């Protein structure tokens, strides 16, 4: 026992007898005042699941409106609000909180820490993010100020100037949009700082940087990227508010201001943001794929290097969103090439995942199915990305449904698939129970089929010339049938997500009891009980390899004999 | 698994990690730098593009005294850091007080400058692009000075009550790190606004 890097005695049961005696109100109070990273992680996940359903409903309304030509389910104004709110919600209230929820819950456990570096900052960040979300949705009631029935932001999620100027966006809808994103942006910044400090300064003994689980590595990289990604947006939002409230001229073309500079500032945020969302998806896949094909990850150092490369390169590609604004040929060439360059480290990652799968004994649980789906879809998303990086091609398809299909392939096909994979994987750790596999399989297959019906077809619509953000279209454009197909696919995805939500809730009470390590995994979070006690580990773990739990389970053949 | 003859090569390795407070503050500074970068870029982009007056050359004066004060406050806070590390609390309070005084002189300079600009030269945020970008950038920096001044004054009051000693030197080091950042940002703002932009 003495020579084992970890001991099973670290696994202890949290006392549940006291927990049952407290009243509901006391329980609620505990959740509100908590600074425990695990509680905050769960709050993040619940918060973003709620908004996932809301934004999904908005997407369905958009699709119902577009199912037939000349449809009038939504008015044009409401349609604009819905696509604005759908985009903003999905990026800021679903994507990022989901990933920070995972980070909050998993990172301290994976590095053998007691909690995050700054627990109170952690709670503060969560409540800022939550306040930002509810502020955004309050605009449905208060957006018009005192002289109307209320409306929501309708300027698109990128809110191009001068549409956001006072004269074109009266009322307070745009202010709610800007303020909500500033507030949740500060929350995001706080969490990013917290994750960086945690990963750098709170690792348990023996966990050198090159022994960190790849999930933790990627979340460190994402947090560093977030520091320089979300802040330009905050700065630009402040400028927008200065324009709207103090009469400034940043984006006021009539006083010499430039609407182009907003587009630059927005995409200096907006493109790295895509990597902020997708790198955690990679991180989840990095954990799940090895465990479910029973092999160590292929090319660990290459994975780390590729992720760091993506972080740097992603900061220099933003203007590929702007090929049609009329840049110089030099700029066009630069941003075409830098965008293509991202394909190299990303390709390395895909090859490494496939090499990990190669020859493995793959267990096709729901978790793994979502990861396989992710691999397949992310490859296609990357390829259409390369197509769009070619500026002449982009001139043809800019702001068409081809672009919509491309980025939904990334954000749904990669990010949402990995989020689902992560939830099926770590649900057992957080609740002590497994999610139902049969319902999970239904969820996966319906969601995957619906996804492909919707977004494969959208590529065709884009090639046929259908632009984004249009409220309705003429019957003679030849888009009618394909639009109906897209909407049907959306409906199937909606049903799949409802199955997921049902499974998510019901498994909490009825799920099979999971035990501490249901997947026979290798990272530290599986050495503690499910759910982990407040203090995570009874004694501080000490690790000697990238797979500490493998060393513990196979002391005759520990990993550290082969590493370094 | 209890009796495996495992002799791990790194059994006796030393384990040191950086201070989480320093790492956290460094991360905050990186994020803040990005905010400042965007405002500086906007200032440079709009240099000379105002459609009407007043222009920077007409109304701006180089704030030499304020700049000297702010930059020397980096030196005084460094002396205060050294003093608290060596537990010389009298010296610490003195150098900290000097830092606060220098920062206050800087802020007074900005306040008087703005008063002149607003009441004599009629330059406000909505006068022209110069006004918009100038007040935003200098105001953003001044806000950071105010936050720093609040932090320093809190520590100063605590030290007057004798609540601070060398055990807090690491925490004070984090405040000092922030203050050095505020000072170095001023070098950029000063160069862009008063040297290049005038």
Image (cartoon, helix red, strand yellow):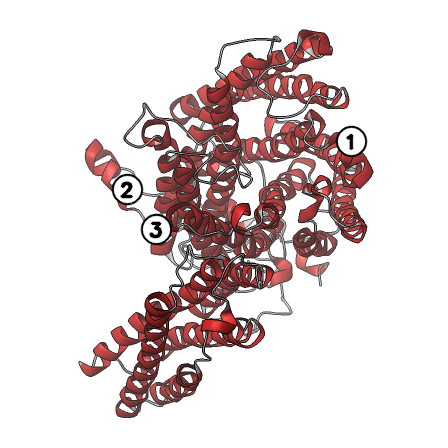
Q: Can residue A515 be seen here? A: no
Cα–Cα gap, marks 2 and 3: 11 Å
Cα–Cα gap, marks 1 and 3: 46 Å
Q: Quadrant of residue B169?
A: bottom left
Cα–Cα gap, marks 1 and 2: 51 Å
- Apparent side of residue B146 relative to residue A337 in the rendered image (left or right): left
| Picture layout, residue B97 above or below residue A480 | below
The residue closer to the viewer here, A435 or A90, is A90
Q: Which circle's residue, 2 or 3, is located before the other in the chain?
A: 2
- Mark 2 vs mark 3: give the one in front: 3
Whole-percent x, y for residue B196 in the image? 58, 74
The residue closer to the viewer here, B113 or A297, is B113
**Mark 1 sits on what residue?**
A396
Whole-percent x, y for residue B146 in the image? 33, 69
The dot on residue A124 is 3
Q: Which circle's residue, 1 or 2, is located before the other in the chain?
A: 2
**Mark 2 sits on what residue?**
A32
- Apparent side of residue A374 relative to residue A75 in the rendered image (left or right): right
The residue closer to the viewer here, A412 or A327, is A327
Count residues near mark 3 (Cα–Cα under 10 Å), then give few for <14, some for 14-19, many for 20+: some
Question: Callout 3: helix, strand or loop?
Answer: helix
| Picture layout, residue A206 above or below residue A339 | below
The dot on residue A30 is none
- Apparent side of residue B22 relative to residue A265 in the rendered image (left or right): left
Q: Quadrant of residue A121?
A: bottom left
Circle 2 chain? A
- Mark 1 vs mark 3: give the one in front: 1
């Amino acid at each position: 026992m003495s020579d084992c890097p970890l001991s099973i005695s670290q696994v202890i049961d949290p006392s549940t007898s006291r927990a049952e005696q407290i009243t509901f109100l006391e329980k609620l109070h505990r959740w509100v005042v908590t600074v425990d990273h695990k509680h905050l992680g769960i709050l993040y996940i619940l918060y973003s699941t709620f908004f996932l359903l809301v934004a999904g409903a908005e997407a369905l309304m958009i699709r119902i409106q577009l199912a037939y030509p000349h449809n009038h389910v939504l008015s044009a104004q409401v349609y604009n609000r819905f696509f604005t709110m759908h985009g903003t919600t999905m990026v800021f209230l679903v994507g990022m909180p989901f990933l920070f929820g995972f980070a909050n819950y998993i990172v301290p456990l994976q590095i053998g820490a007691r909690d995050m570096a700054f627990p109170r900052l952690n709670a503060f960040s969560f409540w800022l993010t939550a306040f930002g979300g509810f502020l955004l949705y309050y605009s449905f009631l208060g957006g018009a100020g005192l002289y109307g029935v209320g409306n929501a932001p309708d300027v698109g999620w990128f809110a191009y100037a001068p549409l956001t100027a006072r004269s074109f966006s009266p009322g307070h809808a745009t202010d709610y949009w800007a303020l909500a994103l500033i507030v949740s942006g500060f929350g995001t910044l706080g969490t990013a700082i917290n994750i960086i400090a945690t990963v750098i300064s709170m690792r348990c003994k023996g966990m050198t940087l090159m022994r960190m689980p790849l999930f933790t590595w990627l979340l460190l990289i994402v947090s560093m990227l977030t520091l320089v990604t979300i802040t330009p947006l905050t700065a630009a939002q402040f400028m927008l508010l200065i324009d709207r409230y103090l009469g400034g001229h940043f984006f006021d073309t009539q006083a010499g201001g430039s609407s182009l500079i907003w587009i630059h500032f927005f995409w200096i945020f907006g493109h790295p943001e895509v990597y902020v969302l997708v790198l955690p998806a990679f991180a989840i896949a990095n954990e799940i794929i090895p465990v479910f094909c029973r092999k160590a990850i292929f090319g660990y150092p290459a994975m780390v290097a590729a992720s760091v490369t993506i972080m740097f390169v992603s900061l220099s590609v933003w203007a590929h969103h702007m090929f049609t604004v009329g840049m110089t040929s030099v700029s066009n060439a630069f941003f075409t090439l830098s965008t293509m360059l991202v394909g190299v480290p990303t390709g390395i990652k895909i090859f490494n995942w496939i090499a990990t799968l190669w020859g493995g004994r793959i267990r096709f649980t729901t978790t793994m199915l979502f990861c396989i789906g992710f691999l397949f879809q992310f490859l296609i998303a990357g390829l259409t990305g390369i197509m769009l990086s070619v500026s002449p091609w982009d001139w043809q398809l800019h702001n068409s449904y081809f672009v919509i299909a491309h980025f939904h392939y990334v954000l749904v096909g990669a990010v949402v698939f990995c989020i689902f994979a992560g939830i099926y994987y770590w649900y057992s750790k957080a609740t002590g129970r497994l999610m139902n596999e049969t319902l999970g399989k239904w969820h996966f297959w319906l969601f995957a089929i619906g996804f492909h019906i919707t977004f494969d077809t959208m590529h065709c619509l884009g090639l046929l010339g259908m632009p984004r953000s249009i409220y309705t279209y003429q019957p003679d454009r030849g888009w009618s049938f394909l639009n109906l197909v897209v909407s049907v696919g959306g409906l199937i995805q909606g049903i799949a997500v409802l199955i997921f939500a049902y499974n998510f809730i019901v498994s909490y009470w009825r799920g099979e009891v999971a035990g501490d390590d249901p997947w026979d995994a290798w990272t530290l979070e599986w050495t503690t009980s499910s759910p982990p006690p407040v203090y995570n580990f009874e004694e501080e773990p000490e690790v000697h390899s990238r797979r500490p739990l493998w060393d513990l389970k196979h002391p005759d053949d520990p990993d550290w004999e082969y590493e370094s | 698994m209890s009796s495996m003859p495992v002799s791990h090569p790194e059994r006796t390795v030393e384990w040191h990690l950086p201070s989480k407070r320093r790492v956290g503050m460094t991360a905050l500074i990186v994020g803040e730098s990005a905010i400042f970068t965007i405002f500086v870029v906007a200032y440079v982009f709009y240099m000379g593009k105002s459609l009407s007056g007043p222009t920077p050359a007409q109304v701006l004066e180089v704030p030499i005294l304020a700049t000297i004060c702010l930059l020397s406050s980096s030196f005084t806070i460094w002396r205060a850091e050294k003093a608290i590390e060596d537990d010389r609390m009298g010296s610490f309070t003195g150098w900290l007080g000097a830092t606060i005084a220098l920062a206050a002189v800087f802020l007074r300079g900005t306040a008087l400058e703005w008063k002149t600009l607003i009441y004599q030269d009629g330059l406000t945020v909505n006068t022209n692009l110069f006004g918009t970008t100038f007040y935003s950038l200098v105001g953003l920096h001044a806000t950071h000075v105010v936050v720093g001044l609040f932090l320093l004054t809190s520590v100063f009051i605590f030290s007057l009550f004798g609540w601070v000693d060398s055990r807090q030197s690491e925490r004070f080091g984090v405040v000092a790190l922030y203050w050095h950042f505020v000072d170095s940002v001023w070098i950029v703002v000063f160069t862009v606004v008063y040297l290049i932009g005038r």
